[in-house]
Image: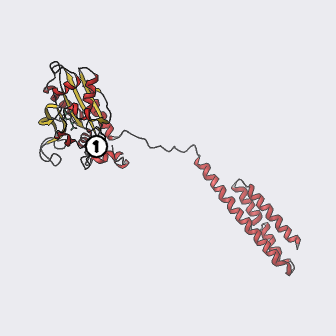
């Protein structure tokens, strides 16, 4: 009896040891055949059970079955781990073409901002920036918005403290620059601006490019010349502009500048609501009242200013219908540009 049990135990140990050490599928198959095959050692043991005395058979049979199950399980584990190892080594196949990491690109809004600034850079303007948190003085007072003036209401300000607000426009940088520098001044100011406003044409965060020219003998003809050069360079050579009388506290006279409709060219369509024109920006001759704040002599110099809504310019140039797409960071939208 003990002879048979010893033989089964020896086979079991040898099989498990071999399976623990196995390192390739060919050896694994040889082990399987040697121990579990039709003529393998476990099959031999099973067969020899028949020639045992009757009272020894149950114990020997049980030992043989258990050993065979253990060996089978160890064989399955060894096969699985060899398969995983081979998958891992395939992942390191250096002959496969590499995976390309997604490439970033400049945001449509930044691109529009750069395009606008580039046009003015070619006309001799330099680029200046200013803070996004402004004082009441720069955002309003020095721009000739008197305290309690109704024009302050039009700006839907977001205050962050007493007399401290998120700038509602880039115009404060006009004052900041004039305080620091003497004319001649030809500058553009790209930047983010903020108002309490939110619908398909207004975002609480939006972007402007401010322009300011102060020099000797500047007239409204210079304003129109510069802005019409901008329109034909930014949109298309055929794009014309027109000036409409308007009001801003810091310019006198003031004008809204319209461009001929980018869709119909001026004939009238859905985009321009039949008028042939699209509003693009505010502008005007610098109100001499501003020169008092910064110590310029209005008898020596004159100038013009303008403020371009970058979002609106981008929407018109690229045919966008909802301004909020520009601020939501949805890659499905952004990848189209
Ligand atoms: N700051 C004005 C606004 O945001 C836009 C503007 C109008 C700027 C006329 C100017 C200007 O420089 O001359 O509503």
Residue 303 seen from this side: yes
Write down the quadrant of residue 80 in the picture: bottom right
> Front-most of 271 and 84?
271
Query: On the picture, is 284 further left or further right than 65?
Result: left
How far across and how far down the image is residue 59, in percent?
82, 76
- State which image quarter holds ligand 1: top left
Q: Give the farthest residue toward the bottom.
A: 54
Front position in the image: 275 or 179: 179
Quickly name the residue at label 1. 158
Task: Return the x and y of residue 241 as percentages of the image width and height.
Answer: 15, 35
At a point 79% along the width and 72% down the height, the residue shown is 63
Residue 299, above or below 253: above
Instruction: Report crowding for label 1: few under 14, some 14 to 19, many 20 or more residues within 10 A (C-alpha).
Output: some
Q: Give the residue drawn at x 50%, y 45%.
A: 99
The residue at the point 71 percent across, 56 percent down is 26
Q: Does residue 265 sit above or below 46 in this rendering? A: above
Q: How is the image coloured?
A: secondary structure
* Viewer-proximal residue among 42 and 322: 322
**Residue 72 in the image: above or below residue 121:** below
Quadrant where the N terminus lies?
Answer: bottom right
Is residue 252 found left or right of 164 in the rendered image?
left
Q: Residue furthest front?
A: 162
Q: Is mark 1 within 8 Å of ligand 1?
A: no
Can residue 241 be seen at all in this image of the molecule?
no
Horizontal and vertical percent position of residue 8: 82, 68
């Amino acid at each position: 009896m003990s002879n048979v049990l010893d033989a089964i135990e020896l086979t079991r140990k040898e099989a498990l040891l071999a399976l623990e050490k196995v390192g390739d599928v060919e050896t694994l198959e040889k082990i399987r055949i040697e121990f579990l095959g039709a003529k393998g050692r476990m099959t031999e043991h099973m067969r020899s059970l028949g020639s045992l005395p009757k009272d020894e058979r149950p114990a020997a049979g049980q030992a043989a079955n258990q050993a065979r199950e253990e060996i089978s399980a160890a064989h399955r584990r060894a096969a699985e781990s060899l398969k995983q190892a081979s998958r891992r080594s395939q992942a390191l196949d250096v002959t496969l073409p590499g995976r390309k990491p997604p490439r970033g690109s400049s945001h449509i809004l930044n691109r529009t901002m750069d395009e606008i600034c580039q046009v003015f850079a070619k006309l001799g303007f330099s680029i200046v920036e200013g803070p996004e948190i402004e004082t009441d003085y720069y955002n309003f007072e020095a721009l000739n918005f008197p305290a309690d003036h109704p024009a302050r209401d039009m700006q839907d300000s977001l205050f962050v403290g007493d007399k401290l607000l998120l700038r509602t426009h880039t115009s404060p940088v006009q004052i900041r620059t004039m305080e620091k520098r003497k004319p001649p001044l030809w500058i553009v100011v790209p930047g983010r601006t903020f108002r309490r406003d939110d619908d398909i044409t207004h975002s609480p965060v939006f972007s402007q490019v401010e322009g300011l020219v102060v020099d000797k003998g500047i007239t409204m003809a210079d304003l129109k010349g510069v802005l019409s050069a901008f329109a034909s360079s930014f949109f298309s050579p055929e794009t014309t502009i027109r000036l409409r009388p308007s009001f801003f506290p810091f310019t006198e006279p003031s004008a809204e500048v319209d461009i001929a409709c980018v869709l119909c060219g001026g004939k009238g369509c859905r985009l321009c609501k039949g008028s042939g024109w699209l509003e693009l920006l505010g502008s005007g001759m610098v109100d001499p009242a501003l020169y008092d704040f910064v110590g310029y002599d209005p008898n020596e110099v004159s100038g013009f200013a303008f403020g371009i809504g970058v979002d609106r310019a981008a929407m018109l140039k690229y045919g966008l219908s909802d301004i909020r797409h520009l601020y939501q960071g949805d890659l499905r939208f952004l990848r189209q540009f």
